[in-house]
Amino acid sequence: MATKLPPTDAVVVGLGWAGAIIANQLVDAGLKVVGVERGPWRDTARDFNIASVTDELRYAQRQELMLRTAQNTITLRNNPTQTALPMRQWGSFHPGNGTGGAGNHWAGITFRFQPEEFRLKSHLEERYGADSIPDELSLQDWGTDWEEMEPHYDAFEKIAGTSGRAGQLASGRQEGGNPFEGVRSSDYPTPPLKQPYSPTLFAETAREMGYQPFPVPSSLVSEAYTNPLGVTMGPCTFCGFCTNYGCANYSKASAITTVLPALIRKENFEARTHCEVLKVTTDSDGRRATGIVYVDSAGRRWEQPAEIVVIAAFTFENVRLMLTSNIGEAYDPATRRGTTGRNYAYQTANNVQLFFDDKNFNPYIGAGAVGMGIDEFNNDNFDHAGLGFFGGGSTRVTPIGATPINARPTPPGTPRWGSNWKRATVDNYASTMTIGCEASNYSSPNNYLSLDPTYRDRLGRPLLRITFDFTENDLRMAQYVTEKTAEIARRMNPRQIVANPRTGPWDGRPYQSSHVVGGFVMGADPSNSSVNKHLQVWGVPNLFVVGASAFPQNPGYNPTGTVGALAFKAADGIVNHYLRNPGEMIST
Amino acid sequence: MKTLVGVTLALVPMAGWAASTEYQDIERGRYIGVLGDCAACHTANDDQPFAGGVPLETPFGTLIAPNITPDPATGLGRWSYEEFKAAMTEGVGKGGYHLYPAMPYPSYTLMHEKDIRDLWSFLQTVTPVENAIEANQLPFPFSIRSVMMGWNWLNFDERTFEPDPEQSDEINRGAYLVESLGHCGTCHTPRNFMGGEGSDKFAGATVEGWYAPNITPNAHVGIGSWSDDELVEYLQTGGNRYGFASGPMADEVHHSSQHWTEDDLYAVARYLLSGAGLDSSDWDREPPEPLPEDNPQVAAGSHIYFDRCSGCHTPNGGGEYGIFPQLASNPLVNGDNTTSLIRVVLAGSRPVATDAKPTAPAMPSFAWNLNDEEVASVLTFVRNSWGNAAPAVSAGEVADLREEMRGN
Amino acid sequence: MKHKDDDAAPGGLTRRQLLGSSAALLVGASGAASGLTFQGTPEWKPFDNVAVEPVDTEAEWQFFTDEEAATVEAIVERLIPADDLSMSGKDAGCAVFIDRQLAGAYGGYERLYMHGPFQDGTPEQGDQSALTPRQRYRLGLGALNDHCRNEHGAVFAELGEDQRDRLLAQLEDEEIQLDDIDTPIFFELVLKNTMEGFFADPIHGGNRDMVSWKMLGFPGARYDYRNYVERHNEDLGFEPVSIGGRPDWQTQG
């Protein structure tokens, strides 16, 4: 039995990027907000001490900053004929834990989605014909558009101090920026980072081939930056302990380095850590969320009543909470009815390795989001007529820092141990680089999230079950964009290239990307979406579910910029619309 | 506030003066309390302002600042204004017992009568809290309050503030704030063996395991290289490019100076930087020559600095404005007293977070990572690089402070 | 490995350290609040850090029996043989590393979801074994030596280098099926842990004198390449540094 706590105006579940941003906006609007976080309070100087954070074994191998699967995990299978089994050790993706969430150990790449993405289905039908989208895909529009999203992207970048070079401003095309981006209302808050050797070499070749390379937009700030909340960050030092690590010198944007220092000082806000939310409570007819129930580290259960409930956890937990709280109708792939769990999608990660003899890339110099990229083969930036697929990828070189337990590239056929292994390892360590192609993953009626019938978490709740495999569309796309990437690689004239297009079936073991999206998607139509464009749950007006769970499909970009923008969008919806007509669906 | 600059209110003391109930007097008294930083010692819990109860460590033992709310049984509820004034200006409490000079009555004695009255009026309006405090936690013989009679005879003059007619109103206002309400010398002036403020005014002193730095206009070890804007920025926001307020100064900024008016802050800055009130022979000294690069400690320290420190403080010691203090040409680094430097390297530190600077970027602890010799070497390197010059730090000093802090 | 002040206990907090409006409180059963609740900037606790204690490489085996230790040393000595590039995996401390890892939280998979039912799935569903690393080593090493005794009349550690190399290759290629444990589960774990020990920071017990980092040209636990990022295609000549430091940190003379 849960002990009932005094009510609050709003409760926000999860204090990563989305939760911290929304909590801050609501507090500034005068609401009293309680933030509830499953993991610990993270502090840069204590948790990411500059002398102890540089520990590859601890952070990359043993996954120190990630959610413990003992606390919660998922089950996985490629299709409904299989029995889903638990992911006992994180492989394919790396969910985070604690304040800042996965935003502490992310890479920092901060793209905006392109304007066409928000009306992808309409766009493709307009360009390629009404019947052009294959049946295996369930693409759809987002219910919003570029004009509505742009100010929120702008707000997020200003919070994060994102570094980069604008490609499109109101004044026109900007040399050296991404020509394919939507028109920006302002330039990046900080200039592009300096570039290591491998991205520089890639950009030179790409330019020679007629492509338009640009610095990868990065929320690793390039110079000391004070954001609109007054919080200051320091410049990135290219230490190479970035992705999978917390940042010791306040240069990687995260909720803990950009929002929480200001938020935690505000009187209307309090944070409760080590508290795991069990469910959203609703009134008898399910039309109103009454609050949440959570369990603290001592195992005691508490009910926190609230006028507004915001769920802003990672994609998996957002969807699981909706399923366990019976919010919306669970998706059934047989009938294709139901929206909760529908349109789960991922990322199609491809790469090409380049082995040189005469180069020293100093590959230990790097950062999660330093690099150069091109977008000629991303999304619908190229003509898909006759190609047999839609989508594409962001082609780029981003040396994240070659720490040696994991980053010891050798050509295929090299022994895995013994003197010959050692020789090859030494010969290739400094002279190998990789061009990645982070490609789209288009949703399908066969890919979805549901509750596992067998496996349960430590609190007795069903684990979330992922049923997922790459579609034919995505596998064809992977072959195409990887070949385009390999063309650039060959032009760079290495001794050997190895192309690694993503192939099926989806493998839960090797890390590919933490960009898990969908399952509680946004849209204009309650029959195929769970939330409206304000991230407000259809039929439960005081419940907002925010995060990448709202993406109807995943373009060839990293999701965090859009997660941040959606957080600002949801907060804007609550503050400027919902509070004027509480208890109603926002109609504008 | 401007109208009060330099004005001495010649009120005739009279028995039975009653607290004012005028809004403006009470509001002014609240601000006097902010200037005097009463809350630093008398407020343990922000939800119970002035209810006392925070232990204050002194070289002679622990004192606890009393409850100064109007609670009759445990606060000042039964005190008269005259008794309050005697405590503020003479160090004598109700009934004639002697206060310990942790209560800065040797500074408050300079207060204008009007300021004391308004402060009293304000304190009469705060919520009474029943919270009995035993202020005196000192060991014998310091526990004997009458010991303070002799101390006062040697160390204390009861007096009032006299403006210097040669100086501007602003400098005089600054002098009043610094010498009286701000009681800067309480921490920044070295104490003599009896705990009285000694002769090297503002030359820096150790307080509660921190070094309250030299605030004379000496450009090398004092604040002479700071502009008035930088000094005001420090007092108002808790930091400037040279550093962030930590330890007791963080408390001061948090409770007090971030809430001062800008006029008062500039008055303080210009007074301190003018050297008025100081004898220039006490602070106007030539800096020493830095230790050479081939000094073994400097050489070892340069490696440690590059491996562990430059990721924040930058390779050339320039720091990053607003987040990482500049170490180059930083007087806080050059002082003779290395207590705070050793302390922040060993234990780490979080500076004060203010509305203007909410980041509070903490220095991580290195006690687990650097041994005494390594801490001494890296500090010796920092103290003799990029325009700094100061004596080497010894491993013994580091060992002693490590031991002391552990024993705390 | 020198021993640092890794047990620096937080000193008692003084009033000044309990700074500002911070309040981190574990609330009792009052019902007023719950969990670890923060309002205001959490205070800095002196000495606060989450560093791990460096492994004592001189201590006795923490998990392995002497026979197991000898077997593991004989394996890592062949997976990473001594040659002109480096000392052997054995001399670099890989067995010590593995022993300490097994003795700690990793050895029991304490962080992992280890609830049943344990059932075989597709390879893509990942490791579904109910065995912890400690169990995998205990069973695997025992089975390997049983195999060696039966086939070669001696335990693994007593076999010659070439014979050990052949056996390891057979394990890798699944040409030998060990009793009691799935061979690839055992071999892949040993190979992974050996490489971890050889390339991880020396504070974990392997990579003695940063031997693998010197071999690769990996500079180790550094944090500032601002002045180097644009020096392309150039040997920068860094001496590696461990979390625990490097020789240049000591005062010379």
Image (cartoon, grey):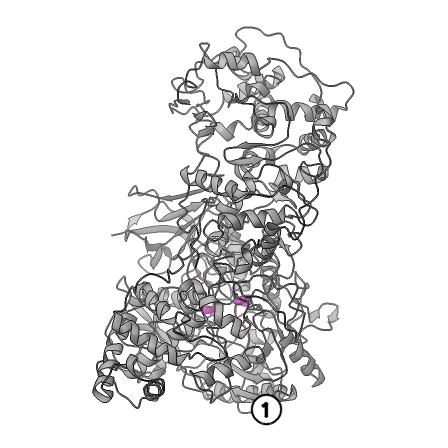
Q: Nearer the viewer, residue B393 or A144?
A: B393
Residue B324 seen: no
**Which residue, as the protein is rendered here, is positioned at the far right?**
B166
On the image, which quarter does residue A385 sit in? bottom right
Where on the picture, by quarter, is residue A545? Answer: bottom left
Query: Which residues are drawn in magenta?
Result: A539-563
Residue at position x 62%, y 79% from top? A375
Callout 1: chain: A
Q: Residues within 10 Å of mark 1 (few under 14, many from 20)?
A: few
Give the answer, above or below, for where A249 lies relative to A123.
above
Residue holding disc 1: A385
Give the percent coordinates (x, y) of residue A67. 39, 64
Q: Position of residue B118 (x, y in %)?
A: 58, 19
- Circle 1: residue type: Ala
Magenta stretch: dominant secondary structure: loop
Q: Is residue A447 left or right of residue A165?
A: left
Seen at 63% across and 23% down, the residue is: B199
Task: Identify which residue, A202 or B8, lies in the foreground.
Answer: A202
Q: Is residue A551 magenta?
A: yes
Where is B165 relative to C62, above or below? above
Q: Residue at x 28, y 63 (%)?
A: A458
Where residue A128 sits, quadrant-wise, is bottom right
Q: Is residue A19 left or right of residue A209?
A: left
Which quarter of the image is occupied by the C terminus of chain A?
Answer: bottom right
SS at badge 1:
loop
Can residue B263 be seen here? The reply is yes
Residue B238 position in % (x across, y down): 60, 40
Whether the magenta-drawn stretch holds residue B263 is answered as no
Which one is nearer the viewer's eye here, A505 or B368? B368
